[in-house]
Image (cartoon, coloured by chain):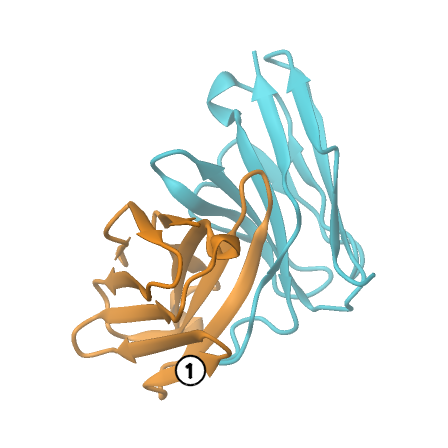
Chain colours: A orange, B cyan
Amino acid sequence: KQEVTQIPAALSVPEGENLVLNCSFTDSAIYNLQWFRQDPGKGLTSLLLIQSSQREQTSGRLNASLDKSSGRSTLYIAASQPGDSATYLCAVRLGKAAGNKLTFGGGTRVLVKP
Amino acid sequence: IAGITQAPTSQILAAGRRMTLRCTQDMRHNAMYWYRQDLGLGLRLIHYSNTAGTTGKGEVPDGYSVSRANTDDFPLTLASAVPSQTSVYFCASSEEAGGRTDTQYFGPGTRLTVL
């Protein structure tokens, strides 16, 4: 059974510092991996999707890397801003044969202090 | 604005009552999903539908049923609510079911409390 872990559960940094968020998964046979952002009381917003054949994906200040062999993904947020404060979740999808589901990590709650 | 709408936003329900959570998307996505989010357990898939007319069970389907009569709507029904179904429920959709670049888009959620 695929398990997804995000450590730490919470993180606090001063504004301007780079953020590094970790995600690990137990089954390396993934189809793709997504990073989401969730604001308090809101739904999830997709940030980046990395295909299993890719090693990284970039969007603005966000960069996500994927190392399937070690079962890890890292989300980097450069020059953090107070508006980056949110919970960040990673989710992996196994292949079609394993069923059509995303397995989510527990999330990392980020606070960027002005 | 294109996206997913869910209703109601929140609901308090007596145990044993029947409840239907509504979800509508206007993106013409083929696949739709229902998740529940609980503190300490993260998001878990309840049911999914790869295309109109088909449904499948996710990780925690017991006590829930779904239907997919058309592309846009994917209601989730609790036939007889129990307190353990207190949770925040999210509906999501994706263009296709399981493609490698298949991003899921989420609705704003329904906060359900069963007393």
**Element carrying mark 1:** strand
The image shows residue B106, relative to residue A41, as above or below, that is: below
Q: Amino acid at mark 1?
A: Gln
A14 displayed left or right of B61: left
B27 displayed left or right of A58: right
Residue at image position (72%, 50%) is: B74
Residue at image position (71%, 68%) is: B29
Q: Position of residue B95 (x, y in %)?
A: 66, 72
Quarter of the figure that contains the N terminus of chain B: bottom right
In this view, the residue farthest toward the left is: A70
The image shows residue A109, relative to residue A55, as above or below, that is: above
Q: Which residue is mark 1?
A: A57
A66 displayed left or right of A82: left
For the residue pair B61 and A14, the one nearer the viewer reads as A14
Q: Position of residue B43 (x, y in %)?
A: 44, 46
For the residue pair A104 and A112, the one nearer the viewer reads as A112
Q: Position of residue B38 (x, y in %)?
A: 44, 35
